[in-house]
Image: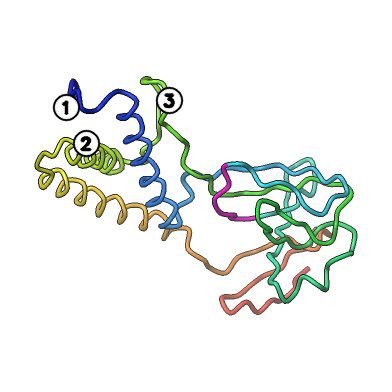
Amino acid sequence: MENDPSIPNDEWHRLISEMYGEVYSVVEGAGMRHFESEQTITAIGSTSYALPTDHLATIEVARVLDASGHRGRLRRLSVQERSRWIGQTGDALCYELNGSSLTLYPKPSTGTYSHLYMPQAPDLSTAADNTVVDLVCPDGEGFLIWGVVVKAKAKSESDVQLAMAEREAHRERFTEWCALRAFNDSPRPYVDRSGYDGGFDFYDPSSYRVNRP
């Protein structure tokens, strides 16, 4: 369909961009951290800081402890907890998301914080033809290509059965592949540096915490 007059060049770009968004959805829906990004927040005495324009979901917020890059993980507040922290100042120990802002508690006047997050899929509708995009694995590429074929054939009122079968076969394998990769990063007992005093906290699966020197 390369020279199909019913689909101009800019529409091909929109179809590809739409399907690339679906590729992103499969990856991020599986919990796979393939497309994650990092925002650096420098505390200036404000409580809230703007989220990145491409923010989709937050993975972790942590305070950068020293020049070597050691970090202390912040805990996400529940709505019931926030009133206890409002108005307090000092190094942030927890955070919450408010619309397009990330709020730190207590309110820090100095320090650097790392915000690890999942970005939204980029808009490829105006991208150049030689733009390189990450399709994760071969089935990710197949899922995108056959997905575009389905949309294009539907527009020209052609038979889409074969294209739909190919798309769904690639989707199924791609989803399974992403889920298996995400499974390797599943929750488990972990060691967390906290308190910013150089000590470590050890957590068990039931969230029971035992402080160790």
Residue 55 on the magenta span: yes
Q: CA distance from mark 1 to mark 2?
A: 8 Å
Quarter of the image containing the N terminus?
Answer: top left
| Element on which disc 2 rests | helix
Residue 24 on the magenta span: no
Q: CA distance from mark 2 to mark 3?
A: 19 Å
Q: Are marks 1 and 2 in contact (CB under 8 Å)?
A: yes
Query: Dividing the picture into quarters, in which one does residue 10 lie?
Result: top left
Which region is colored magenta? 54-60
Amino acid found under the numbered disc labelled 2 = Ala
- Compared with 89, 163 (above or below) is above
The mark nearer the N terminus, 1 or 2, is 1
| Residue 128: percent from left, percent from top | 41, 21
| Element on which disc 1 rests | loop
Magenta region, main secondary structure: strand
Tell me: 6 left or right of 129.
Answer: left
